[in-house]
Amino acid sequence: MMAGCLNSRFGQTITLAQNLAQTLKQIQSTILLAIVLDSSSHRSSCSHPSLARLSFCRFLFCGVIALHCTGRTSASMADPEDVLADSLETFYDYVPVALSSSGSTFTYSSPLLSDMITLTTPDTQAANWSLHATSIWRSSIYIADHLADLELDRHIGRARSQDRPLTLLELGAGAGLPSIMIAKTCKDVLVTASDYPDERLISTLSENVKRNEVSDRCRVVPYNWGSDPTQLLSQTSGGFDIVLAADTLWNLDLHAIFVDTLQRTLRPSPDARVYIVAGLHTGRYVINSFLRRMRDAKFVAESLVERSVSESSNDRTWSVEHADEEDEQERRRWVVWMIFKWADC
């Protein structure tokens, strides 16, 4: 596969390499070199300056090739942070939990799409930097890659039997990748992409929806978790059929209002579902705390599965017991796929 990719995209790779020479000026080379040289498994081979430079070039070249083969960027635009992330992943088996940076262009391709999704990575006002909304999180990419696991056809069929479209809400949408992906591939779904009412964040999310030509099926609504959801619910009849979220559990202090929002926005129906994907970098104890809140809120877990982001390992059942048995690098390799329904419907 790598050989085929190199043969078919050689010319594009040359162009990208030229652009990379310019974009690398935005990165402090000493920091990048330190990342390479501090990788103990390669330290001995980089003891000579010329070998260090060769290793550094190989490191960056791996990032260039990885970006092209995954289809996440174009030859005319490569975010230096994406090159760095893919170099680390390809060369050192390091899995980043977030990609891109505020203001950068991020592209996503899929066999389900006839064209790529192009996103601007949001920025926020300084007071809201703690939202961590200025990246494309791995969990959102994982959802876009695994839409079939949302079983949207089954949900759409049930909604159609009631002569209405399926309604879906994404909380903490950020750049909007899952929402836009669903809107582009599922014509019978009305999507609401929502995030914190930060002017810059919501403006970028709205622009992404418009740029990808799904404004007729995907609306953007600013919403502060735990507040009155009337505006969110304005195009539904009693709540959403599906509520979706990616990497929204990292802050324990927000669990209460997040769960409150799920209670207020999910349709009171036995068929309604909450889908949440959280990277294990969130922490097992933090995720377990969220699960306790969900039980207290009368939600029952239909599925709790740990999945490898690289799909090189088999799925495994969620367990908090592994918390002390894995390091940060291992946690980066996994997400937890969660499906909830009402306990009393």
Image: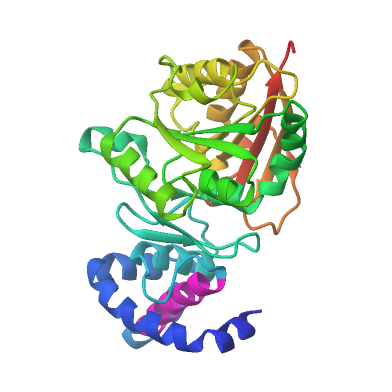
Question: Is the image coloured rainbow, by chain, by secondary structure, or in one colour?
Answer: rainbow
Q: Is 189 on the left-hand or right-hand side of 83?
A: right
Question: Image quadrant for the C terminus?
Answer: top right
Work out whether 208 lies above or below 158.
below
**Which residue is at a point 65% across and 30% down the rendered structure image?**
320
Res 288 quadrant in image: top right
Question: 156 or 259, which is in the foreground?
Answer: 156
Residue drawn at 33 percent across, 67 percent down = 32
51 shown above or below 82 = below
Tell me which corner region of the image, top left, top right, bottom left or bottom right, holds residue 275. top right
Q: Main secondary structure of the magenta part?
A: helix
- For the record, the magenta segment spans 53-69
Position in image of residue 63 (x %, y %): 46, 72
Residue 168 lies in what quarter of the image? top right
Q: Is residue 267 above or below residue 281?
A: above
Residue sitting farthest toward the front: 163
**Which residue is rendered at x = 66% and y = 50% of the image?**
146
Q: Is residue 47 visible?
A: no
Taking the spot 46% from the left edge, 62% from the top edge, the residue there is 107
Residue 185 lies in the magenta stretch: no
Q: Nearer the viewer, residue 200 or 36?
A: 200
